[in-house]
Amino acid sequence: MHGEYRCLRCGPVPPLHVPGHIGAEIMASVVERVAADADPAGRPGMPLWCPWPLPTGWTLTGVAWVGDDRSGVRATAVACAGPAPLDGGPADLLFVAEEPGVGLGSRLAGLPGPDPGPEVAEALADPGPGHPERVPHAKIRVGGHPTPLWLVNSPTDRSAYAGEARGMWLHAIAWPASAGHLLAEEVVLHDLTEWTPPELVYGAPSPYLHGRA
């Protein structure tokens, strides 16, 4: 299985394993690898968060995981692509789940440091003009639960949101920046390690999982 992957090292991120292509067989092998690290005592393992159902016209374009045989899986990423919600041009979305200190989501979002904690704390401390209370910038459903996400400072070519789900960091990163408006719609994230829909449609490999970010 490892022969199907390129391993990259960047900043604080441990080895990142990214299939060169994506399809049902590759997805099944990654799900098997990630699910193998679930705690037999019942603690949830690392999820593979994917919008399901996918937005109209969208495809799944990549999957990745961070870790090695010693440390196990410490982060995952799922990439999707489709028409942007405002102008219909091409758009890409990445969803990253990771343990604290891994740094994959921050690298893809263009944030300093390994975790978005300082950025989220700033968003919580400053609700913005006209908002007397802290209002999340996006609110999606993750594993059946309403989950707030907070807009964090990122390069102008993308928009990045961060929050927590299942006690792990959750990042949602969109290119171009305007594609982040998709998160204002009814987005539901499903863990592919629990069930991988056979109806998933796969597209061309995401450039953002292969070094363009």
Image: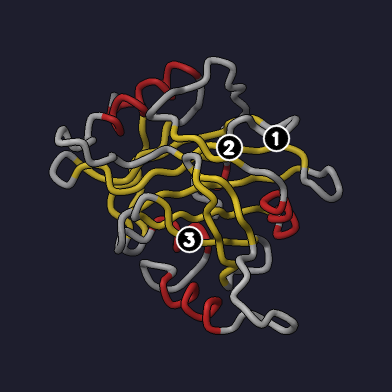
- Quadrant of the image containing the N terminus: top left
Residue on which the image places disc 3: 163
Q: Amino acid at mark 2?
A: Pro
- At 49% from the left and 72% from the top, the residue drawn is 120
Q: Are marks 1 and 2 in contact (CB under 8 Å)?
A: yes
For image coordinates 51% across by 62% down, the residue present is 162
Residue 13's image quarter? Answer: bottom left
**Callout 1: SS:** loop
Q: CA distance from mark 3 to mark 2?
A: 16 Å
Query: Residue 96: horizontal and vertical position, in percent?
Result: 45, 49
Instruction: Tell me the residue that label 2 is attached to.
Output: 51
Mark positioned earlier in the residue sequence (3 or 1): 1
Crowding near pointer 1: few (<14 within 10 Å), some, many (20+)? some
Amino acid type, residue under disc 1 in the picture: Pro
Q: Residue at x 69, y 55 (%)?
A: 180
Location of mark 1 (residue): 55
